[in-house]
Image (cartoon, rainbow, N blue to C red):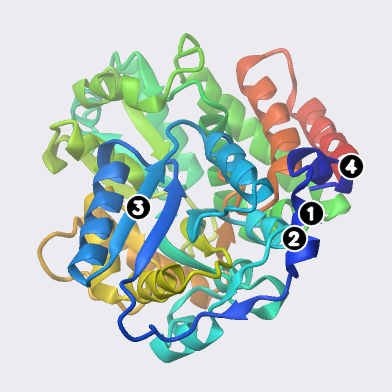
Amino acid sequence: MSDIRRRRLLAGAAGLAGAAGLAAVPVTGRAQGVKPRLTAISQWSGGSDGAAITALGKKFEERGGIWQHAPVPGFTTDMMNKLRAQIIAGDPPACSQLKGPEIAAWSKIAPTVNLDATVAAAGYEKVVAPDLAKLHKPGGKWAALPLQVYRTNTLFLSKRAMDKAKADKIPTTWAQFNELGEKMKAAGVTHPIANGGTRADDGQKFEAVLAGLNPGAYRKAIMDLDEKSLEGPEMRATFAQLRKIADWMDPNTAAQHYSVFLPRFVSGDMGMMIQGGWAQGVLLNAGYKLDDFIIAPGPTDNGKPVFVLNADAFIFWQRKEADLQAGQKLMAELVMMPEIQTMYSQITGSIPVRTDVDLSAAGWSDGQREAARTLKESVAVNQAVLSLAHNMAQENGITAAMIDVLTEFVKNKAVTPEQAVKRLAEAVASAR
């Protein structure tokens, strides 16, 4: 985020933080006789996300704590506006939902808790993907804890659309993906690609393609913002493939959420869906069955697993009250527990952040087991990359500028891949 943007977003908060001091303080042991209390804000209020955080709150209460969660429904920006207001008022929550590079940005304008000792005691860093761990350690100190992971380049296939196309092979490369799309279209599947009309929806398709074509180019162009890579041949190939995908999408989705169109996906009117693992939770919560769809990794052309990573996390803000400090310690301990991550992910359709959680037991789908395996394997071959569409690869300002270009390309067929590559590079240059 540019200095101007950050000042505009968080006007007044920096002065408050300066007065309070920015040094992260360690979370300490529970004072004797103090009942842990936690004030928390997130955007999770309904559906599987609401059910999961409610279940987490119950676990907190079972451990003797007082759970005070104030959800802010809507987009992440709505929740961040609430967080900004509380910070400016000198009353930050004990913890809040926050993710990606925003963790480092926000930790500069309000003092956070040093979670190093608690993380070390849990051995947590050893079981978290390295790129993910770095995001939660601004200044080298743990200030936030990732709770659940989603792969945004997950491929969902409608069983009924597959039947219409007389297809039984899951595409593993982009050439096979295109072949299946053509077969579905020829067989009467109205829209081979299921989609919504949101900006994140467009961004997910772009990142799935680029990472699947060349994860090394993705890392350089999207995560490192390397100028040469942003205008490289892989980017043009990505936009060319994205045009094929856009041509198979329903253009009449306006700004509607992808979940609105899930009945058409399950019925076979839409064929393939590129979404995060959360779509499993949404589908099951809507009453559909695992037999209605297939979950698979997104196509990858180099034969090695690729994982475009999105993670939800909690950041912990300094509070002087003994009961809130005790609540922060309890919350931190809970978030890192294998059994809590298991409970949470089984509700939402995500996978645990911990790479050592056993997913062989009942309660996990084959799709989640495969995603967890792929995360581990992709980390081993350095092909786990951070999601652009969900603010993991870059902070809000740069992300917004890039997604503007992607959305325009998806919606406007007059824009060529060559023009899109140039516009994307220009958008990054102006937003930096």
Residue at horizontal 34 percent and vertical 77 percent from the top? 34
- Residue positioned 54% across, 53% down in the render: 98
Q: Nearer the viewer, mark 2 or mark 4?
A: 2
Q: Which residue is mark 4?
A: 429
Q: Residue 312, position in %: x, y?
A: 46, 55
Q: Name the element at disc 3.
A: strand
- In which quadrant of the rendered view does residue 156 lie? top left
State the residue position of label 3.
68
Q: Which residue is mark 2?
A: 17
Mark 3 or mark 4: whose residue is earlier in sequence: 3
In front of the other: 254 or 420:
254
Q: Nearer the viewer, residue 233 or 209?
A: 209
Is there a contact, CB below 8 Å, between mark 1 and mark 2? yes
Given the image, on which type of amino acid does mark 1 rest?
Ala
Q: Nearer the viewer, mark 3 or mark 4?
A: 3
| Separation of residues labelled 1 and 3 (CA atoms) | 26 Å
What SS does tag 1 mark? helix
Query: Label 1, label 2: how many angstroms apart (C-alpha)?
Result: 5 Å
Closer mark to the observer between disc 1 and disc 4: 1
- Which element is circle 4 on? helix
Q: Which residue is mark 1?
A: 14
Given the image, on which type of amino acid does mark 3 rest?
A: Gln
Can residue 392 be spotted in the picture?
yes
Give the Cα separation between the discs numbered 2 and 4.
30 Å
Badges 1 and 3: C-beta atoms under 8 Å apart? no
Q: Earlier in the sequence, mark 1 or mark 4?
A: 1
Q: Quadrant of residue 159?
A: top left
Q: Is residue 321 left or right of residue 69?
A: right
* Amino acid found under the numbered disc labelled 2: Ala
Number of residues whose C-alpha sits closer than 10 Å to that of mark 3, classed few (under 14), some (14–19) or many (20 or more): some
